[in-house]
Amino acid sequence: MAKNKDDKNGRDKLYKRLRNHYKLVILNIDTFEERFSFLLTPLNVIVLSGVTFLLISISAFALLGWTPLRYYLPDYAEEVRVRKLAIETALKADSMELELSQRDEYINNIRLLVEGRVDTSAYDASALIEVDPLEIEYTRSPEDSLLRKEIEREDLLNLNPSFNRDSKTAYLLFPPIKGTVMDRFNVQRNHFGVDVAAPKDASIKAVDDGTVIIASYTAETGYILQVQHDNDLISVYKHNSSLLKKEGDKVRAGEPIAIIGETGEYSSGPHLHFEMWRNGIPLNPETFFSFE
C-alpha cells in the first residue's frame, strides 16, 4: 500500500510540475525594456513540440512522395533509372523480334521461289480478264457536274509572261479576290476603284506578275500594297489586315500578297478597295474581270 501511495504521489508531483506556469520574457539588453512575453507550461511545450514534429514529418513525406524532390533520393532515382532501362530494353527486344520474323519470312519466300515450290492454289486469274473500254458505261455524277461548272466560272490565268504584253492589246489578269462589289468605280465621286466584300481572312492575290513598290500603313486606308506591272500598270490594294509581301519583293500572278481586313479610318467592315492605274490614269477594274 505504501508503495502504491508513493507512486501516486510521484505522478501527482510530476503532473504538477508539467502544469507549472512559466513566463518567457524578451527584454532589450540595453534598456531592459520588455518587448513581449507569454505564459507557458512544460506540458504545452511538449504538446507543441510534438505537433510541430508531426507537421514537419507529414510535410517532408508529402514533398518526397509527390513532388520532383523524390528524384533526389538515391534509392528512388536508381529505381527509376532501372525501370526506364527495362522498358527501353523490352521495346528494343520486341522490335528485334518483329524484324527477325519478317526477315525469316522473306528468306523462306526466296527459298520457295528458287526451289520452284510456289503455291498457286489460291491464285485468282479472273482479275486479269481484259475489259473492252467501249463497253464501259460512264455516268456523270451531280458532284462532277457542279465541279465542272465551278471551274468553268473561274477566270483563265495566262501562264505565258510574254502573251498580251504590248500596249495595244488587252490584258489577261488574275482577279485579286472573289466577293460582292459594294461600291463601284466612279471618277465623279473621286472613287478610283472598287470595294469588294469577302469572307474574313480571305487571301488577296496579285493580278499579274510585278514588283511591290509600296507596302506600308496609313491612317486613312490602313495596310496598303502597290504592285508595279508591265506597261506602266499599277495595282493598289487597301484596308488589308496584314501584308504578306514587302517592298522590293517579286510577285507572280495569282500569288497571295495580303489578307483582307478593315484597317483605316475609311473602312467599314472587311473588304478590299482595289485600284488600277496606267500612266497616271485610273482604270475601271470591272472592265478587266468579274469579282463575283
Image: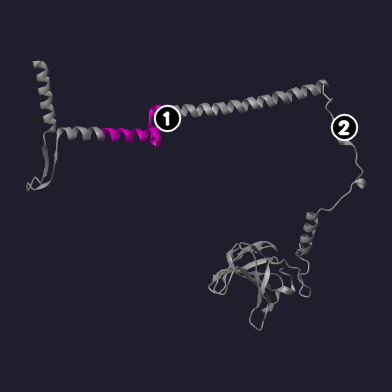
Q: Which residue lies furthest to the left in this view?
A: 31
Residue type, numbered disc 2: Ala
Residue 221 quadrant: bottom right
Provide the residue span drawn in magenta. 52-75
Percent x, y of residue 143: 78, 54
Residue 24 is left or right of residue 105, and the answer is left
Read off the residue under disc 2.
125
Look at the numbered disc 2 and give the secondary structure of its residue: helix
Percent x, y of residue 189: 64, 82
* Closer to the eye: label 2 or 1: 2
Q: Against 71, is 274 above or below?
A: below
Residue 35: say if magenta: no
Percent x, y of residue 116: 83, 21
Residue drawn at x 87%, y 32% is 125
Q: Can residue 198 be seen in this view?
A: yes
Which image quadrant: the C terminus?
bottom right
Distance of label 2 from label 1 (alpha carbons): 63 Å
Look at the numbered disc 1 and give the secondary structure of its residue: helix
Upstream in the sequence, badge 2 or badge 1?
1
Q: Against 125, is 216 above or below?
A: below
Who is closer to the viewer here, 229 or 141? Answer: 141
Q: Count neighbours of disc 2 (C-alpha within 10 A) and say few if under 14, some if 14 to 19, many if 20 or more.
A: few
Residue drawn at x 11%, y 30% is 17
